[in-house]
Image: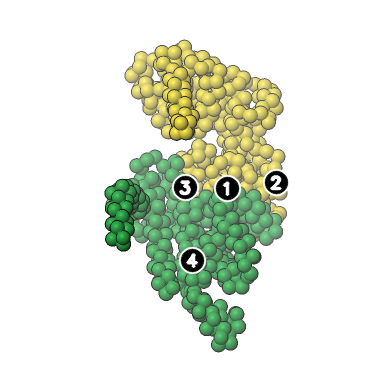
Amino acid sequence: MMGKVIEEEKRQLSDYIKHYRPKQILRDRIMESIIFLGGLSAVIFTIGIFLFVIKEAWPFLSSRFSLMEFLTNIEWYPVSNVSVRYGAKALFVGTAAVTIGSMVLAIPVGIGTAIFISEFCGPKFKEVAKILIELLASIPSVVWGFIAVMVMNPFIINVLHEPVGLNVFNASIILALMSIPMIVSIGEDALRSVPDTYREAAESLGATRLEVVIRVIIPAAKNGLIAAILLGVGRAVGETMAVLMATGHSVAIPDSIFSPVRTLTATVAAEMGEAPKGSEHYQTLFTIGLSLLLITFSINFISDILLRKSWKRK
Amino acid sequence: MKKFLFLNPIVFLMFFLLFGCFGLKKSPEDFLIIQNKGSDTLVNLAQVWAENYGRINSKVAISVSGGGSGTGIAALINNQVDIANSSRSIKEEESKKAEQNSGKKVTEYVVALDALSVFVHPSNPLQGLSRTELACIFGSEGNCDNWSQIRNTVVPGCKNNKIIRVSRMSNSGTYQYFLERVIGKKKDMRLGSMDLNGSKESIDLVQNTPCAIGYTGMGYINDHIKALCVTWDEGGPCIPPTLENAMNKTYPITRELFMYTLGEAEGEVKKYLEWIKGIDATKLVIKMGYIPSPAYWSIEDVNRLKAQTQGQKL
């Protein structure tokens, strides 16, 4: 009796394998290879973009380019009746100025908000705040540019009585608002990944909530928080449209936070259209693109390493 | 059955597109293409003309490209274009070369005038500037950074009395012309100006910025900014940028914009050039911020047309 049942089950199983397994295996194989191709394409695209930018910049890099001129000369005359000069110092300084300015504003606000959302506020408010912050992240950069020109510009001139409204200060505020959502959401993830046992242990030793956060949570989530900041920096360095509109687009070393500047990204965006393909000017713009790529790549690389470290702990 | 229903609209759409395309395609016999190439200053106007002409004469398509006046004339010499656009008059050796190549004399048509106006914020007490003062403000050899350097001017509402120079991107025809005419052929603009992308943008910026000075095509001037008169020769009269002064060429920053053909224009090309002289094309000239050619239009006509075109779409 028993043997018969087992025989029957065996038969059913082998039928099942005969009929269904090959299909399943095939489906799995197909899905697997699609996902593999997806993953592979990301790698190929990254390498491809690097190679493309280097290829376009190479004729300039291998002939006229001098790192000294590029980094230390402020004379950016890509089109000139006298002599063309490609000194990008002012552009590097411009990018650095708006990045530092925006981070001075964005880091305290962003990290502060992340700590508040993750450690202090109630669940209902948390939901609302997260949705609103994500909404802030979805505003297109050209809209930020409009705010810079239409709202911030008259404000700076009429209320602060500065000579120019489009300047480092204006761009820093706009960039800070753009990178805060990123800092908040990644920072909050990092704080949340600190195990609750840490909090419980600290509280059982008699620490107040503030002490828990400052002495335990922040040190534990340090790497993740730094990664959040670095990704915000990367965003600020790479942003183009909003800074093109907000900085005043002026090749000069700023002497105050109310001086107009020009950034690397804005220069590429504004001049790419006029530079004939393959010309020296075009190659120079690709050289700027390559420097930007190297800057953001190294920032992302560092933050990636830090994020990995913070996950490992968990 | 379900599948079929799902496919149906797509199949229908594909067929529709396929046959739709066949229907739209015209055979080359009943379709004449006029090649038009040259000046970047004129290219925007030429494009608007071409578009509008295409609407009233569907048998002709005008292909407009820029590249600069020299490019256009070179193409005319090689008989590659029907009409060459130029913002300078043709040189003698160029017209000789063209005659040698084709056996036809080059015919010149003045299609419009281009006049630049220098403007400041209405609170600026200055009424006019001389050529040397303009070169001091904008030129790379000048050093005027403060309004007090210009006849001890004090601009109310302008912090530190600093001059904010509003210029244009180096690909702009306006920039090139201003540079070559006011500052000098073998000169550069000084760095540190705010290099904007369009005429409208520079006007918007100057009308909000008491310290600013900018320049633009005369047609863009409005009531929110103050256009300055220009003294060309030391001790000469200060000439305000009015339509009259531009059309009788007493205003110094005015130039003629030309179209050139090989021999007298014939057939469809002649019809097109006749249309350009006409009222519809002239309205477009005014709309685009250029000045109609005094060869065909009196000042009264132009003022009347200007009143008519106000608020009209292109």
At label 4, the amino acid type is Ala
Which chain letter goes with mark 2? B
Q: Chain of mark 3?
A: A
Q: CA distance from mark 1 to mark 3?
A: 19 Å
* Residue, disc 1: B166
Circle 3 — which element? helix
Bin the neighbour count of mark 1 within 10 Å (Cα to Cα): few under 14, some 14-19, many 20 and up: many
Residue A120, placed above or below residue B102: below
Name the mark on residue A228. 4
Chain A appears in which tint?
Answer: green
Say if labels 3 and 4 share a chain.
Answer: yes
The outermost residue toward the front is A1
Chain letter for yellow, please: B
B51 and B266: which one is in front? Answer: B51
Q: Say which amino acid is labelled 1.
A: Val
In the displayed structure, would residue B97 be above or below residue B138?
Answer: above
